[in-house]
């Protein structure tokens, strides 16, 4: 009897440019299967997703759904065939309830397409889907109150209510901590039991090994190897994808710890209070915690993007940071998001201009007024940013971090610098970061990756509920203690 596939690609090729194209892709996805695509950046994974979803149409080859040829010319055709893409950063509306976000644009109505929106039926269906996924989320809660993990689970639930049978996940756990990841994996496992299939792109190879049934390795637009996940362990998978020995990933060549560069005493600000922390020259400190922990707020406030109380000492001298330009001039550099970078740049423009009526300053102010006007016009339909405000993709975030590291500073505040990038790109960032340490800088490295925290960092500090829950040398802490401290924030 011929095996049944939900999705099958036969010899699919697509030229994207003179330099890159998909070549003869053969891939099969069974009901209840998780199939992971792995490979270096620009190996063709995202292009393949775009081709499956109808953004690109194949030049050659066939796409089959349930064994029948399917003509997918656009995303609407893809959705009609049960294909749903859950991208890294889903568009959500912060002030709308969860259940309305699930059905936004596909509302259930009473008496046909022109009838009134049936909120009761949508609420009931939302509760039903969350039960299927074994997820405990209040459907009536405002979307803005959810954690990153809950938002990702809600995005998957939205795929289900739109009759998604083949769900494409692009870096599904970026910025999630270990306990949040487990919630995601448990939900995927439950949906597999219903016969739904998943195609996943992930640079997190531990994640791939945890959830995938089949793994395909892509290189230069081709699938060069496809095998059951059981044929790989982490070391073998790293070597298959990148040709790198796993023990060589975390580059550490740094001086002995030097003088104290930054000290915080009872540091308090938006979403955090009473934080006392010390950073030393030549050391990197992993700064960890859940989405609501306050770790990002600490970093932003140190860069002058939040009002604070408490004491800050830089190189032994008291320091006040009322504005971003003060932080930059003192030698504190932040890399968190494109918005933060623009706000810091606007602060520099305003100060350098010397007066508010200069054309450059007026442009900065006008841009802010425009955004405020747009927000007012949208009313309740406020677009939701990711909880941790890391809104850029992996490569964009890496570029932002690299720009920050090129600046001269005493303290570098680097937020999720390696999220969503491949291992060679991570290794390049580790190397550049070590060069900063050799010059006597101190680095606060915000990360959700516990392997990175222990493999790369000298110290680990964990935030929980706006306070510092755990702090110490990486050598003196256990993974279990760190995971417990982080997990408490995500429950």
Image (cartoon, rainbow, N blue to C red):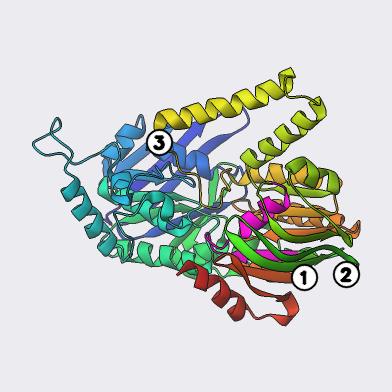
Relative image position of residue 2 (x, y in whole percent): 26, 56
Identity of the residue drawn at 81% across and 52% down: 432
| Residue beneath disc 2 | 257
Instruction: Please give the range of residues in magenta.
Output: 285-304
Q: List the residue tagged with mark 1.
A: 458
Give the Cα separation between the discs numbered 1 and 2: 9 Å
Question: Is disc 1 in contact with disc 2, using a CB cutoff of under 8 Å?
Answer: yes
In the rendered structure, which disc, 3 or 1, sits on the residue that comes first in sequence?
3
Return the residue nearer the eye: 112 or 235: 112
Q: Mark 3 highlights which residue?
A: 61
Numbered disc 3: secondary structure: strand
Of the image marks 1 and 2, the number of the one nearer the N terminus: 2
Numbered disc 2: secondary structure: loop
Labels in figure, total: 3
Q: How dense is the environment of label 2, judged by Cα within 10 Å: few (below 14), some, or many (20 and up)? A: some
Q: Is residue 294 magenta?
A: yes
> How far across and how far down the image is residue 215, in percent?
48, 59
Q: Nearer the viewer, mark 3 or mark 2?
A: 2
Residue 452 in view here: no
Identify the image quadrant of the N terminus.
bottom left
């Amino acid at each position: 009897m011929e095996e049944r596939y939900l999705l099958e690609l036969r010899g699919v090729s697509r030229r994207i440019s003179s330099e890159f194209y998909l070549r003869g892709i053969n891939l099969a996805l069974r009901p209840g299967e998780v199939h992971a695509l792995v490979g270096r950046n620009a190996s063709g994974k995202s292009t393949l997703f775009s081709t499956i979803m109808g953004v690109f149409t194949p030049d050659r080859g066939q796409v089959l759904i349930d064994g029948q040829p399917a003509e997918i010319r656009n995303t609407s055709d893809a959705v009609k065939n049960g294909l749903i893409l859950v991208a890294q950063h889903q568009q959500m509306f912060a002030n709308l309830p969860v259940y309305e976000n699930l059905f936004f644009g596909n509302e259930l109505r009473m008496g046909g397409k022109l009838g009134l929106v049936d909120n009761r039926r949508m609420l009931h269906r939302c509760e039903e889907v969350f039960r299927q996924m074994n997820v405990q989320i209040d459907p009536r809660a405002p979307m803005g109150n959810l954690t990153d993990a809950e938002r990702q689970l809600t995005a998957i639930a939205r795929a289900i209510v739109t009759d998604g049978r083949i769900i494409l996940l692009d870096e599904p756990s970026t910025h999630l901590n270990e306990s949040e990841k487990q919630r995601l994996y448990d939900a995927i496992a439950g949906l597999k039991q219903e016969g739904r299939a998943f195609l996943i792109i992930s640079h997190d190879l531990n994640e791939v090994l945890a959830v995938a049934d089949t793994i395909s390795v892509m290189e230069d637009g081709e699938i060069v190897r496809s095998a059951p996940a059981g044929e790989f362990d982490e070391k073998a998978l790293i070597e298959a994808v990148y040709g790198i020995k796993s023990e060589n990933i975390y580059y550490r060549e740094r001086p002995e710890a030097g003088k104290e560069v930054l000290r915080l005493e009872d540091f308090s600000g938006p979403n955090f209070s009473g934080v006392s922390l010390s950073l030393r020259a030549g050391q990197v400190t992993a700064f960890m915690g859940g989405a609501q922990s306050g770790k990002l707020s600490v970093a932003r406030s140190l860069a002058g993007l939040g009002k604070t109380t408490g004491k800050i000492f830089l190189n032994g001298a008291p320091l006040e940071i009322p504005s971003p330009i003060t932080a930059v001039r003192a030698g504190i550099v932040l890399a968190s998001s494109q918005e933060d970078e623009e706000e810091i740049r606007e602060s520099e423009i305003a100060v350098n201009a010397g007066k508010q009526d200069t054309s450059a300053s007026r442009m900065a102010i006008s841009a802010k007024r425009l955004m405020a006007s747009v927000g007012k016009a949208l009313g309740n339909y406020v677009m939701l940013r990711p909880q941790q405000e890391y809104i850029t993709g992996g490569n964009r975030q890496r570029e932002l971090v690299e720009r920050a590291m090129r600046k001269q500073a005493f303290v570098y505040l680097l937020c999720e610098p390696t999220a969503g990038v491949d291992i060679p790109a991570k290794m390049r960032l580790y190397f550049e970061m070590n060069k900063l340490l050799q010059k006597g800088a101190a680095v606060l490295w915000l990360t959700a990756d516990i392997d990175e925290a222990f493999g790369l960092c000298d110290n680990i500090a964990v935030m929980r509920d706006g306070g510092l829950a755990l702090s110490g040398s990486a050598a003196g802490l256990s993974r279990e203690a760190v995971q417990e401290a982080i997990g408490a924030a995500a429950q």
